[in-house]
């Protein structure tokens, strides 16, 4: 998990997002799609497509339950990069 967190922080800082505490971001805003997109990209970089897909499902379910909205086009574009198993 530390490796994934470190990749998320590096990716986030490159995009100008404060990724110093991804768990804190997650707890403050359960529907923060940029957080989930970064996490999915980190899982993909680690060649863990199943984990990336689980992350998307969590994001999609929270958006549907809490906000009654589908994932954004940007999130779906990241999902499209996940190889099918």
Image (tube, rainbow, N blue to C red):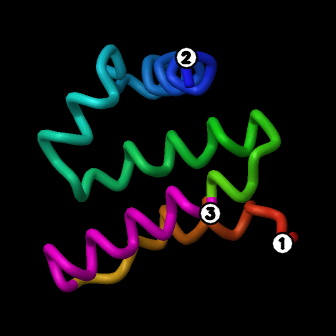
Q: In the picture shown, does residue 3 fall above or below 30?
A: above
Q: In the picture shown, does residue 55 fall above or below 10?
A: below
Q: Quadrant of residue 41?
A: top right
CA gap, disc 2 and disc 1: 26 Å
Q: In the picture shown, does residue 54 fall above or below 34?
A: below
Residue drawn at (38%, 47%), measured in percent from left and top? 34
Lower position in the chain sequence, tag 1 or tag 3:
3
The answer to whether 74 appears left or right of 18 in the picture is right
CA gap, disc 1 and disc 3: 10 Å
Q: Which of the numbered marks, if any, corresponds to residue 53? A: 3
Where is residue 25? Give x, y as percent.
23, 34
Q: Secondary structure at mark 2?
A: helix
Residue drawn at (62%, 18%), measured in percent from left and top? 3
* Residue corresponding to mark 2: 2
Whether residue 19 appears in magenta in the rendering, the answer is no
CA gap, disc 2 and disc 3: 19 Å
Residue drawn at (44%, 18%), measured in percent from left and top? 13
Where is residue 69? Give x, y as percent.
25, 82
Q: Secondary structure at mark 3?
A: helix
* Residue corresponding to mark 1: 84
* The furthest residue to the right: 85
Residue range of the region highlighted in magenta in the rendering: 53-68
The answer to whether 67 appears left or right of 61 in the picture is left
Lower position in the chain sequence, tag 2 or tag 3:
2
Q: In the picture shown, does residue 37 fall above or below 85?
A: above
Packing grade of label 3 (10 A; few <14, some 14-19, many >=20) is: some
Q: Quadrant of residue 18?
A: top left
């Amino acid at each position: 998990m530390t490796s994934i967190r470190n990749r998320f922080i590096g990716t986030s800082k490159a995009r100008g997002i404060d990724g110093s505490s991804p768990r804190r971001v997650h707890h403050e805003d359960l529907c923060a799609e940029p957080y989930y997109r970064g996490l999915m990209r980190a899982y993909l970089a680690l060649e863990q497509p199943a984990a990336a897909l689980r992350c998307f499902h969590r994001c999609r379910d929270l958006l549907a339950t809490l906000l009654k909205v589908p994932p954004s086009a940007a999130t779906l574009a990241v999902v499209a990069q996940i190889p099918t198993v």
